[in-house]
Amino acid sequence: MSKETFNVDKEKNFSEWFNRIIREAQLIDDRYNVKGFIVHRPWSMTMLKQIYRIYEDALERRGHKPVLFPTVIPEDNLYKEEEHVEGFRAEVFWITHGGDDRLDKRLALRPTSETAFYPMYALWIRSISDLPLKLYQSCSVFRYETKATKPLIRGREFLWIEAHDVFATEEDAYRQVEEDMEVAEEVIHKRLGVPFIFFERPQWDKFKGAVKTFAADCLMPDGRVLQIASTHYLGQNFSKAFEIMYLDSDGKRKHVYQTCYGPGIWRILAAVISIHGDNNGLVLPFEIAPVQVVVVPIPTKETKDVVEEYSRTVVDMLRSAGLRVEADFSDKTPGAKYYYWEMMGVPEVGPREVEGKYVTLFRRDTRKRVKAPLEKIVETVKKLGDEILENLRRRAEKFMNSMVFRAESMEEVRRLSEKGGFIIVPFCSIGYDGEECGLRLKRELGLEVRGVPLKNRVKPPEDARCIVCGRKAGEYVYLGKAY
């Protein structure tokens, strides 16, 4: 970071803000010479590892176990479920050669791993005692993205978690879908401060091969919608294609019921950066900050030794409490130090702090200073960490709530669409019979039918009409412009 200040107006020009912060804060480098593939630098990779840790822990506490499957999928596997492969055919990277030799059968770089997991599930599952089976892997996936790529939001390689779960009954499978949504609420909203709405997606926009898709959408600062997680009820579509069966207690062979779950770790980080950041740079939830506390001593020539010794005492106290701490003893100017470290809470240590045996902490979210006695520094920092998260979450919720609008006609929708955000409208159907209306909204206004919210789902009154076709409205749906 060569400039004294970052100072980009996020509200007026979010695109410039995002493009600059991910580069100037050294989160990524997209100068790697393959389109859509980026280098994750230490600062972003540390945050991604923290998000993975939190998410994996939440999954494992609920009975999931970790696995790692091969990156390549045989072409035969990919083509076993017809609807599924049609959804991904245009996005697949194919390996056609090994050295100079052309392969007899092409291998796909995994675009998603249903067709890698499920042939193995057919081998592993034999009886009711093998169920439920709940496995997940943390990995990157590859998709030949033809739209404009954007680091952490849309790329040709991206990071996620995928869980693939198997059950004896439809009821158990639907309970898993509900659990997946609970995990998203715990991790993304409660612990990372990013609010979202879970929708049942329209049938024409569901995961290919699924019976139903449920997806979490958040709102970015420019009012665009970002999908950050999805869970899918697969029914028996894949178990019939891959012959995944079990022997029940009556000695009958039955096909299993399945779900899959995909938290987008990449996009979750993009949402955290975008929603919580301000005009001065990054503002991070305390739990995932690569450095949670930075001690910045500002001594005079006369006090240099004593201030630095005092600073090291503060560092040792915080590190011994398990906090991630650094101290900036560089020769940079105070302004340069504050600019660089303003992306997280900074305890400032100077001569007065030495004399009074206290420290001054700079809160990155409110940019206010808090004084704490040295003996209470650990307790104060941890308390402030909790307060920062609560403040970030409350601020993000307020923004999202302010960006939800209602419309009863295409004219109103056209006017509101300029603001961004969600627009709630009466709509004919999220079944295939509503697809043409959805396509018209996309074609004329650039809006997508995000679906029906799973919380507070309200049916329209009898006289309500679809804003597009005029037929009886079967649902209130949310519209939005998506990345």
Image: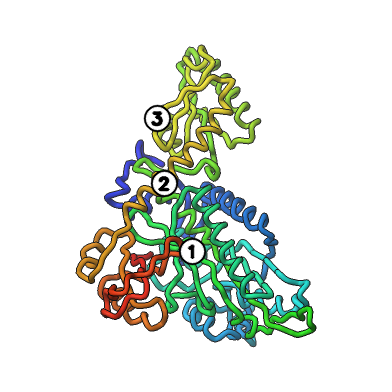
In the image, what residue type sits under mark 3? Answer: Lys
Point 44% across, 33% down: residue: 363
- Residue 324, x across and y down, in percent: 58, 37
Query: Quick one: 311 or 4, which is closer to the camera?
Result: 311
Please give the residue where the numbered disc 1 appears in the rendered image. Answer: 37
Look at discs 1 and 2 and give the one toward the viewer: 2
Q: Which mark is residue 303?
A: none
Q: Secondary structure at mark 2?
A: helix
Q: Residues within 10 Å of mark 1 (few under 14, many from 20)?
A: many
User: How many callouts does the rendering have?
Assistant: 3
**Marks 1/2: CA–CA distance:** 25 Å
> Of marks 3 and 2, which one's residue comes earlier in the chain?
2
Q: Is residue 341 left or right of residue 251?
A: left
Point 55% across, 58% down: residue: 182
Vertically, is 242 above or below 464?
A: below
Please give the residue where the numbered disc 3 appears in the rendered image. Answer: 368
Residue 304 seen in the figure: yes
Quadrant location of residue 96? bottom right
Q: Are marks 3 and 2 in contact (CB under 8 Å)?
A: no
- Residue 332, x across and y down, in percent: 44, 30
Residue 31 seen in the figure: no
Q: Which mark is residue 276?
A: 2
Q: Secondary structure at mark 3?
A: loop
Q: Is residue 303 left or right of residue 259?
A: left
Q: Secondary structure at mark 1?
A: loop
**Marks 3/2: CA–CA distance:** 16 Å
> Of marks 1 and 2, which one's residue comes earlier in the chain?
1
Q: Is residue 13 left or right of residue 171?
A: left
Q: Residues within 10 Å of mark 3 (few under 14, many from 20)?
A: few
